[in-house]
């Protein structure tokens, strides 16, 4: 994350550096992205960059954190609209809100695409759900277990891992085809299968 010197900058300059990072990482994979291009777009010197960040990973993590805050705000708003939905209905609303947001933010969408398709160890680790997202989903599952909607013996962590793995597969297809409606339809089908199972009895 940024050094203290970065947070001492005025908001306008912080925003300019953030936008420069967004532009570069939306055009290039993490490996191919250039610090030189970031500092050129931000209008700062290389020396100044290293006063604010340790390295390329540092500014990448900062950028993802800021984007993540925006995404969580969108998700929280979607949850508040239907607070009594069961876990699967809530998950579908969250998915729809997140996809709509990503569709409206093309540069963020491009960054997400490059993350999904990147198989480097550093990026694979970053693809894991944030602790906040895991906690939110876990609380929804626990609530529905108390309601008797989800079996009490089912482990919330396992449900989340299954959904994450399946959605990662869907996201790869979505980003390659840019098919928003198809992605939402496929997510709906996946959630229904997990909810109802595949056995006929």
Image: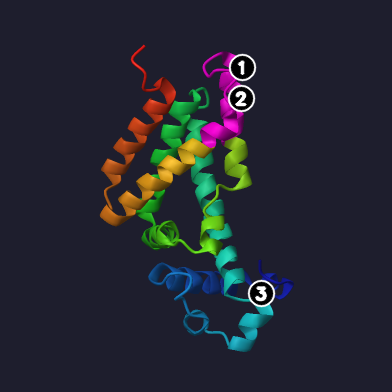
Estimate the spatial distance between the alpha carbons at disc 3 and disc 2, rounded to whole Å: 43 Å
Question: Residue at horizontal 57%, vertical 28%?
Answer: 140
Q: Residue 142 location in percent, x, y?
A: 61, 25
Tell whether position 145 is magenta. Answer: yes
Question: Residue at horizontal 37%, vertical 18%?
Answer: 199
Looking at the image, which residue sits at the far top? 201
Estimate the spatial distance between the alpha carbons at disc 3 and disc 1, rounded to whole Å: 48 Å
Q: Residue 101 location in percent, x, y?
A: 41, 49
User: Within the image, what quadrant is residue 109 found in?
Assistant: bottom left
- Quadrant location of the C terminus in the rendered image: top left
| SS majority, magenta | helix
Task: Determine contact: label 1, label 2, CB under 8 Å.
Answer: yes
Task: Determine contact: label 3, label 2, CB under 8 Å.
Answer: no
Question: Residue at horizontal 46%, vertical 76%?
Answer: 33
Mark nearer the viewer, 3 or 1: 1
Label 2, on which residue? 142
Tell whether position 116 is magenta. Answer: no
In the image, 134 versus 37, the foreground residue is 134
Question: Residue at horizontal 55%, vertical 33%?
Answer: 158
Looking at the image, which residue sits at the far right? 4
């Amino acid at each position: 994350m940024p050094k203290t010197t970065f947070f001492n900058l005025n908001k306008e300059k912080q925003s300019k550096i953030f936008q420069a990072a967004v532009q570069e990482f939306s055009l290039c994979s993490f490996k191919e992205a250039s610090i030189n291009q970031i500092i050129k777009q931000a209008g700062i010197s290389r020396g100044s960059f290293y006063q604010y960040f340790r390295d390329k990973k540092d500014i990448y993590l900062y950028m993802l954190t800021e984007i993540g805050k925006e995404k969580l705000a969108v998700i929280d708003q979607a949850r508040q609209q239907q607070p009594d939905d069961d876990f699967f209905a809530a998950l579908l609303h969250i998915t729809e809100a997140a996809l709509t947001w990503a569709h409206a933010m093309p540069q963020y969408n491009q960054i997400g695409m490059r993350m999904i398709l990147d198989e480097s160890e550093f990026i694979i680790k970053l693809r894991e759900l944030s602790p906040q997202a895991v906690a939110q989903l876990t609380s929804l599952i626990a609530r529905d277990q108390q309601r008797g909607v989800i079996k009490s013996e089912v482990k919330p962590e396992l449900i989340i891992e299954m959904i994450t793995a399946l959605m990662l597969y869907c996201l790869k297809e979505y980003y390659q085809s840019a098919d928003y409606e198809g992605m939402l339809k496929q997510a709906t089908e996946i959630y229904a299968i997990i909810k109802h199972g595949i056995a006929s009895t």
